[in-house]
Every structure is written in C-alpha cells, then in structure tokens.
Amino acid sequence: MLDLGLEGRTVLVTGATGALGSAAARAFAEQGARVALAFRHRREAAEALAAELSGPERGRAFAVPYALDDAASPRWVVAAVEQHWGGLDVLVAAARRRGARREPHARFEDVPEEHWRPLVADSFAPAIRTAQWAVAGMRKRGWGRIALMAPPYAPEGDPGGEFHAVARAGLRGLVRGLVDELGGDGVLINAVCPGPTSPDRSPTTPYRPPMSSDRPPAMADRPPTSPDRPPAASDRPSTSADRPPTAAEGPMTTPEDIARALVFLCSAANGAITGETLTLAGRR
C-alpha cells in the first residue's frame, strides 16, 4: 500500500467551502492530516465542515476567515495555522473569485475592466501572498507542498475564456519560476487546472453535464442546436445534455477526482513532480 505520509501533517485549504475546496479538505482528513479551512463568506458551512472533519478526538480541523481582497489576510491565516499546530506543511490555494459574466455577443474590446479584473487579479495576488507566507516555515522545516488551483478550462470559444487563459498562464509561470529556488529546501509546488466538473457521477443518474459556470446566463438559457440536423419549428433543438457522453468526450471529472490528485501531489509519495500544471479533464 502506498504510504502518502500525510498522517499528522498540517494542511491549509483556501476556498474550503467551495465544491473543490471541501472535497480536498475531506480527502486530506481521510489520510490523517489536520486541516485548516479558510473561508470568505460561508462561516456556518466552514464550521460545520470543521466539526465533521475533527473526528472523535476533536481538534483535527478548524475554520479561519480569509479575504481575497485583503493583502494582510494571507499572513494572518498562515500565522493562525502555525500558532494553532506549530507549523504548516501543505498549502492548497483553491480560493478564487469569478469574474463578471460577459455578454454572449460582446466583443473583446468592449469588455469593461471591472468584468475581467477580479478573475485575473484574484488568481494571482492572493495565491502569491499566501504562498510567500507559507514558504517561509516550510523552508525552515525542510519539507513542504504547495498546490495552486488555476481557473478551469472554458469550452473552446466561450466568451471570457481568454481571461481564464491569462490567469492560468500566470499561475503556470509562477510555479515554473519557483522550482529551483524551493526545490533545494524540500518544497514542491504545482498548479492544478480542473476541467469541466460534475458533482455526481453515479451510475444511476442520467448523464446531464451542467453548463459551464463561466458561461453567460443568456447562453445558458439558449441550448445549442444539434450539429446533426437543423431545428424543426415544432421541435426543441437537441443539446449535449440530452445524450450520453461519447467515447471522445468521456465522463466529466468530479471534485473527488481532483481532490485525489491534490492529495498525491501534496504528499510524501510525490518526491519529484514540481513546477507542473496538471490539467484534470474527464473530457475536453
């Protein structure tokens, strides 16, 4: 059996009340790690998850506020974990803010800055700040793992997809640039880019992939026409949600799939993978 070496390790998960963050927190707790759950707004959800993960002996998880737009928040959060448990071994930076939805027919040059700035800026600055404060303690202890969650891939040609690509490229450059500096101190850093995700892939549930969360409402309300035939006036156009996945598409990934990859990358079993951007997509 592969020993992940996470028993007793301390883990900080930002964005812990989201689907990906909460799945990651559970996966680390299942390996015996102690987990700090950083949240922005959903305090009750974070505290309920902390109670769930604490176990019968309690004290194996706690919730801590974290604000993407507060430059002092990452320092305070890392300090809280180090004070609570004596150190921080693993950082999973899954917190990010969605950019405003872009109108389906808006041209690139017409997208106002306030629409794309949160998506781009909040993928860079909070991750950099939190990693900076986390790295200092990891260097001293000679061991650490960092996983930065990149924005998901949008379907080809989706409005706003170019801004997701910019954010992903920035995080990819960050992890590549830190490989040599951190590797000598036993700290590995990677980025994980989720593809389209589905909360439920149960065999009893018909396959109905959700619309991309980044797609404008106007587009989500207007299903695409089937490529096989033009729509008839009396017939609703066929959508991808009405048919099972093809072999080329494959199944969508679940948050649990992504969480398992995060656990491996941030474990002692990973001794060589660093500076990489891992794309996890059940279908592309």
Image (cartoon, rainbow, N blue to C red):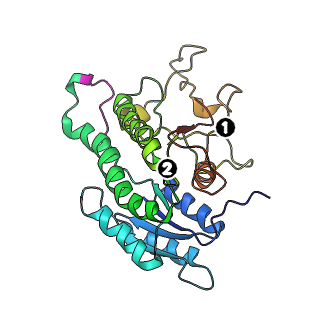
In front of the other: 180 or 189? 180
In front of the other: 5 or 153? 5
Image point 59% across, 50% down: which residue?
A: 265
Local secondary structure at mark 2? loop
Residue 184: mark in rendering: 2
Q: How many residues crowd mark 2 within 10 Å: few (<14), some (14–19), many (20+)?
A: few
In front of the other: 41 or 129? 129
Local secondary structure at mark 1? loop
Q: Position of residue 205 (x, y in %)?
A: 69, 48
Using the rendered view, name the quadrant where residue 73 is placed: bottom left
Q: Which residues are magenta?
A: 100-108
Q: Is residue 48 magenta?
A: no
Q: Is residue 104 magenta?
A: yes
Image point 41% across, 36% down: which residue?
A: 168
Q: Quadrant of the C terminus?
A: top right
Which callout, 1 or 2, points to the residue nearer the camera?
2
As drawn, 26 above or below 157: below
| Mark 1 in CB contact with mark 2 (< 8 angstroms) | no
Image point 74% across, 49% down: which residue?
A: 204
Residue 82: mark in rendering: none
* Residue 43 visible here: no
* Residue 18 visible here: yes
Q: Position of residue 178 (x, y in %)?
A: 42, 43
Seen in the image, is 99 located left or right of residue 16?
left
Q: Position of residue 155 (x, y in %)?
A: 48, 29
Residue labelled with disc 1: 251
